[in-house]
Image: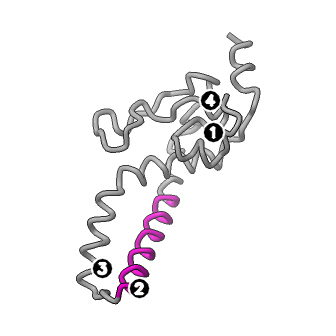
Amino acid sequence: MPQNSTAFSSVMRFKCPRCREGNLFCNKNVYQFKDFFKMPKECEKCGQDFEPETGFYLGAMYVSYGLTIALNVAIFVVLLIFQCYNLTNFFIVAGIALVVTLPYVFKISRSIWITMMVRYDPNAIKNHEAQH
């Protein structure tokens, strides 16, 4: 395992929160739509179940909402700083930004959610290999 692997880096790289090595998504490319939503049933490295219960990722919607609000606030502030704020400009820029960032926000929200719920175990891979 990489020595500098942190929770933040595993979230940003869409890695398993338990071992920080396995991939959360079958397709890691954010803007390639083939198998975009597809996640493995479990981590290939440590065996962590990626859907511990039915509806587990409904909570990721709250994370997604927060990220979207943060993006909109940032756009609002930038428009104010450059003194080009009006409602039309805001809706155009925010609409484009939301469409462009939607795939990334979807995946990062799931990654953040599962990382908040699953504790890191430095011995996860070793323990999984010992069981099999």
SS label for mark 2: helix
Q: Position of residue 125 (x, y in %)?
A: 69, 22
Q: CA distance from mark 4 to mark 1?
A: 9 Å
In front of the other: label 3 or label 4?
3
The numbered dot on residue 17 is 1
Kind of residue at disc 1:
Pro
Residues at circles 4 and 1 in contact by the CB criterion of under 8 Å? yes
Residue at the location (71% across, 38% down)? 120
Q: Position of residue 119 (x, y in %)?
A: 71, 41
Q: CA distance from mark 2 to mark 1?
A: 38 Å
Q: Is residue 49 left or right of residue 61?
A: right
Q: Which residues are magenta?
A: 62-82
Residue at the location (43% across, 68% down)? 71
The numbered dot on residue 81 is 2
The numbered dot on residue 48 is 4
Kind of residue at disc 2:
Ile
Q: CA distance from mark 4 to mark 2?
A: 46 Å
